[in-house]
Image (cartoon, helix red, strand yellow):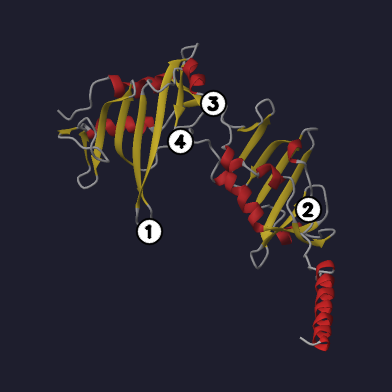
Amino acid sequence: MNLRLLLVLVTILAYVAIGATWFITNPAEEIVEPDPPFFYTLAPEDLRNISINTGEKVTSWSLRENLSRWYFDDLNDVPADLFRWGGITQLLGGPRTQRVLAQEIDDVSLYGLDDPSATFAVTLRDDSIVTLLLGDLTPDGVNNYARVEGFPQLVLVDSSWGRVLERLVDEPPYPEWYYPLDGQPREVILFNNNEVLRAYGWDRATGIWSICDIPLLTDPCTGTRLADGAALEAELEHFGSPEIIGAVELNLVEDTLFEPFGTVVESPYIAVQIENRNPVNNVIEVTRLTMTIGDETDGGTARYAVANETSDIIKVNKEWADRVLELFFGDELSAN
């Protein structure tokens, strides 16, 4: 390579290096759209009570500070489901406004704020109350008109914010053990001492219940003897309407912690399979309800129980539980 060519290459490489250095040290500025401002801001840890009124229903919850859990106000010792409740206090801490439409509202009825579609009232640790009124949807359906009670501004709030919170009223965040029996039962298995004591199976084609042969070989189980279907379905209706008194202990993680309540693996355990046909895809979906029934409480008016494989100890009415235990230890429900 001659000297002139070498000098040209060195010069080119120098310019490339200078350009690369300038690019690294002077990157192109990224234009970031600012987030919409918050309508109001509340620290989630300051919230003590939440009430949501959708016009048709009102539901409220209070924080039990010693347990760090939110409980339904209209139910006895029933906490909100942790999975469903996660993030709710952050949402109520303040929605982002999409736009401030007016500093003062001349006629609230123009925006549906004379008869709000939903009202969210938050009580804080100092007993002060912040109430957000949600009015009509905007013509494009993207936002709601809104205002805070006691303040004059009219703002827009993303409609999804209100929908998430209204769902807490329409579909309350009950814990998994606060269940109804919804659908067609197709199998009932009763365990005691960790062994199958007896079982019943339902045939979809005939609608007939049978007493299942043990060991259980099919799903749902089957048998050669007919069960008293009417009597069994009456007992399942009873089981599907549990008389729950409330929670006693939450989130037990060690098996030994269940022993004082008699809700151990050897205790009576009922498992009910339920099927429902999905109206969207016409597929039959199968779910299961379970309950371990434990000892009587000291007062003798209730029994301890664990429902749907949760880690919570609950109390159920003793008479209700004793009737369920008849499925285990009473006469077999035979058609003969």
Q: Residues within 10 Å of mark 4 (few under 14, many from 20)?
A: some
Q: CA distance from mark 4 to mark 3?
A: 20 Å
Distance, label 1 to label 4, CA atoms, is 25 Å
The residue carrying mark 4 is 179
Sequence-wise, which precedes: disc 3 or disc 1? 3
Residue name at image x 49 percent, y 15 percent: 260
What residue is shown with label 2?
Answer: 39
| Percent coordinates x, y for residue 55 in the rendering | 62, 48
Q: Is residue 8 left or right of residue 264?
A: right
Residue position for label 3: 252
Image-based side of 36 in relation to 215, left or right: right
Q: Amino acid at mark 3?
A: Leu
Q: Residues within 10 Å of mark 3 (few under 14, many from 20)?
A: few
Residue ID at (69%, 42%): 89
Q: Amino acid at mark 1?
A: Asn
| Cα gap from disc 3 to disc 1, whole angstroms | 38 Å
Q: Residue at x 69, y 56 (%)?
A: 135
User: Which quadrant holds residue 37?
Assistant: bottom right
Instruction: Report the mark closest to the observer, 4 or 3.
Output: 3
